Amino acid sequence: MSNSNPPANSKATADEAIETRVPPWGTVTVLEKGERYCINRIEVKPGHHISTQLHYHRTEHWVVVAGTAKVIKNEEEIMLMPKQSTYVPMNTPHRVENPGVIPLVMIEIQNGEYLGEDDIVRFGDVES
């Protein structure tokens, strides 16, 4: 008899993802999900960006794997190269842009009491 309940922790191998979304600016691949965390691989196309947003119930930590990230947090801009990272606290408006000519690849670690997609408050700019 099979168990229809998903495991408490879901993990994906390098060749297998739990879920992949394809917004206009790139891809988001869920690599692993737990009760209070989610690990994503985010790829942003050259010249594109995610919308400015904030989260009430989770923090995010971004590690750049390839390309260059222009990160805006609370109107402060920082540039990140491979092997560099930044932390985004709860309630902090943030966005990431790819100013480079190659895809920006980041690993994102979300951590918090609630990780639902409805904990995203988007501001006026449009994702591109």
Image (cartoon, rainbow, N blue to C red):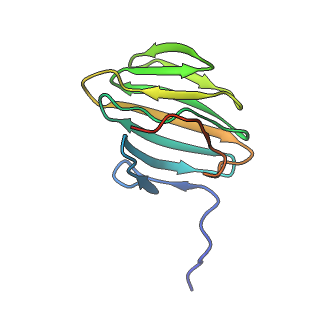
Q: Residue furthest left?
A: 101
Q: Residue at image x 36%, y 26%?
A: 98
If the image is split into quadrants, where does the C terminus sit? Answer: top left
Q: Is residue 114 above or below residue 65?
A: below
- Describe residue 76's horizontal placement relative to residue 119 as left or right: left
Q: Residue at x 52, y 14 (%)?
A: 77
128 lies above or below 33? above
* Above or below, 74 relative to 109: above
Above or below residue 127? Residue 76 is above
Quadrant location of the N terminus? Answer: bottom right
> How many numbered circles are shown?
0
Residue 86 position within the rendered picture, expressed as x and y whole percent measured from the top left: 55, 21
Give the image quarter of residue 9.
bottom right
In-image side of 109 versus 16 (left or right): right
State the image coordinates of residue 107 (x, y, percent, origin top left). 46, 34
**Residue under the point 55% across and 56% down:** 10
Task: Tell me where residue 121 appears, x and y as whole percent.
Answer: 64, 41
* 83 or 89: nearer the viewer: 89
Which residue occupies the foreground of this view, 10 or 65? 65
| Front in this rendered view, residue 45 or 43 | 45
In which image quadrant can residue 111 be found? top right
Farthest bottom residue? 1
